[in-house]
Amino acid sequence: MSILKLTPSCKDYLWGGSRLRTDFGVQSDLNPLAEAWVLSCHPDGPSYLPDGTMLADYLAAHPEAAGTDCKKFEMFPVLTKFIDAKNNISIQVHPSNEYALEHEHQYGKTEMWYVLEAEPGATLYYGFTHEISKEEFEHRIKDNTLTEVLNAVPVKKGDCLFIPSGTLHAIRKGIVVAEIQQNSNVTYRIYDYGRKGADGKPRQLHIPQALDVTERKPPVAHDFHGHLAQCDYFTVDAVEGSFKDICDDVSFTSLLILEGEGTLTETATGESLPIQKGESFFIPAGTGEYTVSGTDLKCLCTRV
C-alpha cells in the first residue's frame, strides 16, 4: 500500500487566527482559521486522500492498513489537529468513555498537546492549583472566580502536556499546538469569557456535565518511558533530523511535519514523496521500512 498525503478539514472557530495558513501552509480560505484536522476519520471533520476519498472510507475498504492493534477499537482510535489560538479558547473538560457513552452515545476524550509556537509569557490552564470541592467548583463558576484556582502553566515551543479525560484545561491566546487525541468530539464548555457566537447569542455552556466529570485537583505527573505521550489510543514521539523506521503490521504510522522539508521514501518500492512543514502523511500498517530525509526536519510520529 502506498504512503498517503492527507488533506485536512478546517474550522473557523471565533478564537482562531491565521498562522496555520501563513506559518504551516494549511490551504483554507476560512477566516479565522482555528483548526486543521490533519488526521481524522471523524464525521465532524474528515481528512482526505489525494484523490478526494475520505480516510475513513479508505480504511473501511482496507482495514488492514490501520494495523492489527486497531482491531480492538470500534472505530479508528486517533484524531490529530493543528490548533491556532489567537485568542483564549474556552475553559473546558472532556468526559471519560463511560460517561460519554452513556450520555453522548460516543466515546470520551484523552489528549495531548505539543506546543508549536508560543508568544512570550503565554500560559495554558491545566487542572487546579489545589483540590477543591464540587460545591466550591460550582460556586466559582457562578461568580466568575474559577480562574483564581486554576493551574496556569507557562509554556514555550516544544513543551508537551498530557490531558487525561476529566482534566480541566484551556489553550490561551498566543499559542499554536499540535493536538493528538482520542477520536471524539465531545467537549463540555465551562467558561467562555462571555463571548457570543456567530448567531449573536452567548455560546452554550455545559455546567451540569462539567460538574459530573471534572477532576477537581492538580494534574499528576506521567512517565511515558521515553515517549512524548502514551495511552490506550496513541503513542507519540518527536523525531528531529533524518531518520529510518519500520511500519509493521501492528499499527499505522501518522507522520506530522512540524519543521523543515525533505523526502519521505518507502524502501520496498522506492516511491518517494516531498514533505514540508505543516503536512500530514498516513503510512499504512505493513508498509515496512521507510526513510525521512531532509533539512531542519522535526516530526511527530503517532502509532497505536
Image (cartoon, rainbow, N blue to C red):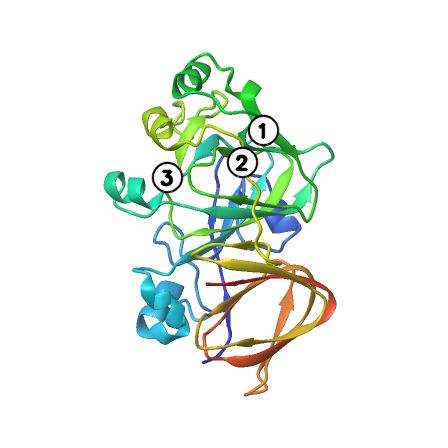
Determine the residue positioned at 65% across, 36% down: 174
Between the C-alphas of marks 2 and 1, the distance is 9 Å
Quarter residue 176 falls in: top right
At numbered mark 2, what does the secondary structure look like: helix, strand or loop? loop
At numbered mark 3, what does the secondary structure look like: helix, strand or loop? loop
CB of mark 2 within 8 Å of CB of mark 3?
A: no
Q: Is residue 160 left or right of residue 127?
A: right
Between the C-alphas of marks 1 and 3, the distance is 19 Å
Disc ID at residue 151: 1
Dot 2: few (<14), some (14–19), or many (≥20) neighbours within 10 Å?
some
Residue 61, position as x, y percentages in the image: 31, 73
Residue 126, position as x, y percentages in the image: 55, 34
Q: Is residue 91 left or right of residue 99?
A: right
Determine the residue positioned at 66% across, 46% down: 159
Give the labeled residue for mark 2.
219
Question: Viewer-nearest of labels 2 and 1?
Answer: 2
